[in-house]
Image (spheres, grey):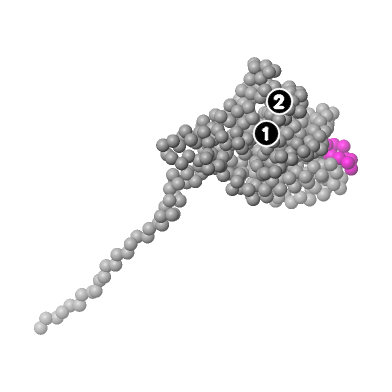
């Protein structure tokens, strides 16, 4: 009698390996990611850095207002009640925005160098190449992690100032060698960004205690500011050369003397007569512009990135008014500081809301600016980018 041994019943179950859905696979494809960024890169230009200018300038204003008061005036104590966490949050937002925009522009330089070169050769666009470096210098002056007398501050200052000096050689060298006729042709309100870049760099140097370097860069900017101011002042009535949608750029007339006033305070160590003269000049220009609303009527019909040109000049003027109020300690000076500071905060909040509402329109190029075929992608893209500069402006 045979004993039947029981064999274990083994079943081999083969399951299919989980597969990634086709739509997820397409989304993680590097080519798909790049193609999704293509519309943004075709639209993006250096003029978008006016957004980072505004936010970084606002961070500098909040840092100034949140510092412990040196006088016991009630208005100064009221402003000092601003929560410190608000400044840290604003500084973080400025850093995140500036890093994101810098990465976008680096990608554009790498993939669409012809478009960047067109900006460099454009008499308006070349001025906005100063904007990223100005933003970084403003952010450096508000950094809460290390003091101005540290090695990190010094190294970053060199990194941000060298490109400004290189652009100075290009722009100011052309003005000097080509003469008055060339300057009167290419000069526009955006040209003042080159001056502001020098002034911001000089103020950062003065914060480190590098007085000689600060005076050197300050004098370079101010001499060319005088030449530029006279040239533009004679052509104010000829604003027809500037498209109506770019009229907000006229507010840069306020930013240059206001920034010069702040810079000289850092160099001289006090709000002296020269700083007051520059502050009063910027205040006069501000009143002159807000009394002419018809100049900006056409530009306000439809939202554009050019609206951000309002914020940065008003913020720098508010900073100058804060220094002036600290110096004279009068009721009118403190009320002026409060009004300008509140206006600066209100303007940037309104711009943020409008930018969020119109984000799809701001970063979406026209259909004819996006290449549709791979064979002619480079040619059509270059043509589209050049068209975007002329249509969207700076």
If the image is split into quadrants, where does the N terminus sit? bottom left
**Residue 247 in the image, given as x and y percentages of width and height:** 71, 35
Question: SS class of the residue under badge 2?
Answer: helix
Most extreme residue toward the right is: 331
Residue found 60% across the figure and 28% down from its top: 122
Identify which residue, 89 or 316, lies in the foreground.
316
Mark 2: give few (<14), some (14-19) or many (20+) Cα within 10 Å. many
Instruction: State the extent of the magenta-drawn residues as a range.
Output: 324-333
If the image is split into quadrants, where does the C terminus sit? top right
**Residue 252 in the image, given as x and y percentages of width and height:** 72, 33
Tag 1 residue: 243
Residue found 37% across the figure and 60% down from its top: 18
Question: SS class of the residue under badge 1?
Answer: loop
Residue found 73% across the figure and 34% down from its top: 250
Q: CA distance from mark 2 to mark 1?
A: 27 Å
Which numbered marker is on residue 221?
Answer: 2
Q: Principal SS element in the magenta part?
A: helix
Asked whether residue 86 appears in the rendered view, the answer is yes
Q: Is residue 23 above or below residue 285?
A: below
Numbered disc in front, either 2 or 1 = 1
Asked whether residue 136 appears in the rendered view, the answer is no
Identify which residue, 190 or 245, lies in the foreground.
245
């Amino acid at each position: 009698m045979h004993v039947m041994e029981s064999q274990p019943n083994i079943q081999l179950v083969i399951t299919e390996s989980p597969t990634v859905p086709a739509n997820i696979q397409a989304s993680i494809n590097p080519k798909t990611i790049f193609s999704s960024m293509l519309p943004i890169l075709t639209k993006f230009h250096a003029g978008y850095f006016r957004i980072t200018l505004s936010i970084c300038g606002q961070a500098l204003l909040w840092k100034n207002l949140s510092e412990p008061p040196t006088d016991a005036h009630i208005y100064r104590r009221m402003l000092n009640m601003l929560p410190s966490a608000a400044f840290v949050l604003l500084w973080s937002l400025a850093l995140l925005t500036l890093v994101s925009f810098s990465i976008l522009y680096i990608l554009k330089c790498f993939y669409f160098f012809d478009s960047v070169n067109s900006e460099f050769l454009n008499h308006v666009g070349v001025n906005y190449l100063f904007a990223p470096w100005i933003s970084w210098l403003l952010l450096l002056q508000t950094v809460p992690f290390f003091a101005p007398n540290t090695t990190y501050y010094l190294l970053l200052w060199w990194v941000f100032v060298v490109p400004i000096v290189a652009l100075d050689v290009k722009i100011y060298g052309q003005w000097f060698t080509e003469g008055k006729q060339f300057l009167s042709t290419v000069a526009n309100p955006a040209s003042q960004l080159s001056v502001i870049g020098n002034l911001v760099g000089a103020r950062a140097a003065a914060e480190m205690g590098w007085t000689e370097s600060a005076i050197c860069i300050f004098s370079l900017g101010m001499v060319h500011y005088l030449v530029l101011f006279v040239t533009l002042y004679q052509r104010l009535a000829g604003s027809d050369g500037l498209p109506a949608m770019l009229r907000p750029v006229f507010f840069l007339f306020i930013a240059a003397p206001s920034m010069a006033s702040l810079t000289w305070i850092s160099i001289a160590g006090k709000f002296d007569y020269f700083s007051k003269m520059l502050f009063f000049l910027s205040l006069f220009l501000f009143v002159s512009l807000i009394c002419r609303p018809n100049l900006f009527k056409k530009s306000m019909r439809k939202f554009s990135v050019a609206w951000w040109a309002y914020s940065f000049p008003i913020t720098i003027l508010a900073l100058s008014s804060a220094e002036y109020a600290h110096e004279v300690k009068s009721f009118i000076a403190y009320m002026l500081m409060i009004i300008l500071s509140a206006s600066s905060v209100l303007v940037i909040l309104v711009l943020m809301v409008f930018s969020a509402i119109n984000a799809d329109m701001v970063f979406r190029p026209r259909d004819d600016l996006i290449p549709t075929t791979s064979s002619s992608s480079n040619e059509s893209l270059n043509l589209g980018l050049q068209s975007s500069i002329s249509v969207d402006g700076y």
